[in-house]
């Protein structure tokens, strides 16, 4: 049987770091992503037939990438928050079990 141990402090720090990384992804999306949108809004590829064809193909992909970037940042931040919550819940469950078995907290 494997002895599984939770380094609660380390796991909670990792979760907080993950949440912060998600926040950083979101900040990058807000800054660099907004810059991409602003620059492409000027249609630097031109408005002739070739520029219009490029626009038709580029714009949907740009929007998909920017939307995915936003979702990724939110997901990573949420995942980090959930790791922190899971650590709290695991420690609370351990305390409850210890109290039931031994009449005391860990």
Image (cartoon, rainbow, N blue to C red):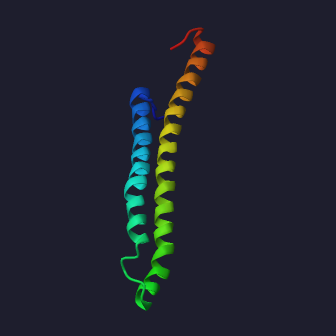
User: Against 27, is 3 above or below?
Assistant: above
Q: Indicate the position of residue 8 as horizontal and vertical percent values.
A: 44, 27
Task: Tell me the quarter of the picture where residue 45 sits.
Answer: bottom left
Who's the residue at 40% across and 72% down the image?
A: 42
Who's the residue at 45% across and 41% down the image?
A: 19
Q: Nearer the viewer, residue 75 or 94?
A: 75
User: Against 105, is 78 above or below?
Assistant: below
User: Against 64, is 69 above or below?
Assistant: above
Return the residue found at the far right: 100
Return the residue found at the far top: 103
Q: Indicate the position of residue 10 as horizontal and vertical percent values.
A: 38, 31
Horizontally, residue 75 falls left or right of residue 51, namely: right
Q: Indicate the position of residue 2 as horizontal and vertical percent values.
A: 46, 35
Badge count:
0
Q: Indicate the position of residue 72 as horizontal and vertical percent values.
A: 48, 54
Who's the residue at 43% across and 65% down the image?
A: 37
Who's the residue at 41% across and 40% down the image?
A: 20
């Amino acid at each position: 049987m494997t002895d599984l141990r939770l380094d609660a402090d380390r796991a909670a720090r990792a979760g907080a770091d993950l949440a912060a990384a998600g926040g950083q992804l979101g900040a990058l999306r807000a800054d660099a992503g907004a810059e991409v949108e602003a620059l492409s809004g000027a249609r630097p590829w031109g408005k002739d037939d070739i520029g219009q064809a490029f626009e038709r193909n580029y714009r949907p992909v740009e929007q998909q990438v920017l939307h995915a970037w936003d979702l990724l940042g939110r997901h990573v931040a949420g995942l980090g928050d959930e790791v922190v919550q899971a650590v709290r819940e695991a420690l609370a469950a351990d305390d409850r079990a210890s109290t039931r078995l031994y009449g005391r907290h860990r």
